[in-house]
Structure formats: structure tokens, C-alpha cells
Amino acid sequence: MGETIRARDLPSLVGRTYGPSAWIEITQGRVNHFADATGDHQFIHVDPERAARTPFGGTIAHGFLTLSLLPQLTAGHGPQVAGLQMGLNYGSDKVRFLQPVRVGSRIRARQTLVAVTERQAGQWLAKFAVEVEIENQDKPALIAEALALYIVNDRADQKGDKSHA
């Protein structure tokens, strides 16, 4: 967990990097569940025998599975905002899948705060440059510009209250 900061002081953290997160293993079971949830049963994800005959040498995670793990990978690795009522995933400005994640490998993430804007009183939009790395690989699995919307108790922020709502 990072330090607790008032929302109005978030811009002072631009440029700060958080993480890395703990490693997460990408299992075939996780990939299969994701395939069932999304209806994407392409053989390179769910058929180990057939996928073994591809240049990947085995099954790989869906790119969107890796992307969907960002909340887990980044939770607790970033600024803790005083008076926070809720934090919302606000989307992404950029996502690139740079290297496939083979089943059985482990991934983790780092994120750098690159921009913060106050949208309206009590609402702060933060942009993070996120990189998901694959253990023992030089090239990351993905890079993204992830957006988070912090909704804070504006009175707590003005008073400098450092408690979490």
C-alpha cells in the first residue's frame, strides 16, 4: 500500500512508479474459464495438443484475459486517496499486446502515474502507464494507458482528512 494523499495533491505524484505487483500464474483453467465467459474458444487458447503444433508451442492466454487482470495486478499499488468513496475503472486510452502469455507462465505489473485532472469537485481522473511483464522475458505482454476515476468526499479532501470513507 502506498501513502495516503489528499486528492488535490495527486498531481504532485505524476511520474511516480508503483509496483511491481505479486506474480500471477496463468493456468489453463483460468484461460478456459475466460474462454467460457467470452465465447472465445479459439484453439490456441483451449486446445493444448493442437496449440503445441503452432509457433507458440502450447496454449496462450487471451490478450483480453491479460488486460482483464489489471485491476488485480494494480490493486494496492498506487496512491491511497483520503476520503475515497469509490474508485472506478474509467477505461483505457491505449492498449497494445506485445507478446503472448504462455499458459504456465507468470505475469506482474508496474504502473506509472502520468496525468491527473480534476473533472469536477470530488472527481479526479488519473492516467497510469501500465506494463505487464512476463517472468524471464525481456518483452512485456502488454502496455496500456489505464484510466481510474477517484470519487472523494470533497469536504474530507478540503480538510485534509486522511481517513478512508
Image (cartoon, rainbow, N blue to C red):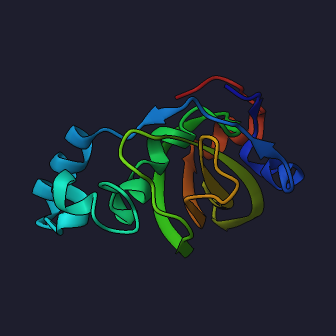
Depicted 82 relative to depicted 56: above or below: above
Q: Residue furthest front?
A: 53
Toward the viewer: 88 or 60?
A: 60
Q: Position of residue 85 (x, y in %)?
A: 49, 39
Q: Quadrant of the N terminus?
A: top right
Name the residue: 42% across, 55% down. Answer: 66
Q: Number of marks in the image? A: 0
Q: Position of residue 133 (x, y in %)?
A: 61, 49
Name the residue: 65% across, 41% down. Answer: 155
Name the residue: 38% across, 39% down. Answer: 104
Name the residue: 47% across, 68% down. Answer: 91
| The image quarter in which residue 101 lies | bottom left
Q: In the figure, is residue 36 to the left or right of 57?
A: left
Toward the viewer: 12 or 103?
A: 103
Q: Position of residue 127 (x, y in %)?
A: 66, 63
| The image quarter in which residue 50 lies | bottom left
Toward the viewer: 26 or 83?
A: 26
Q: Position of residue 120 (x, y in %)?
A: 62, 66
Depicted 37 relative to depicted 43: above or below: above
Q: In the figure, is residue 96 to the left or right of 72?
A: right
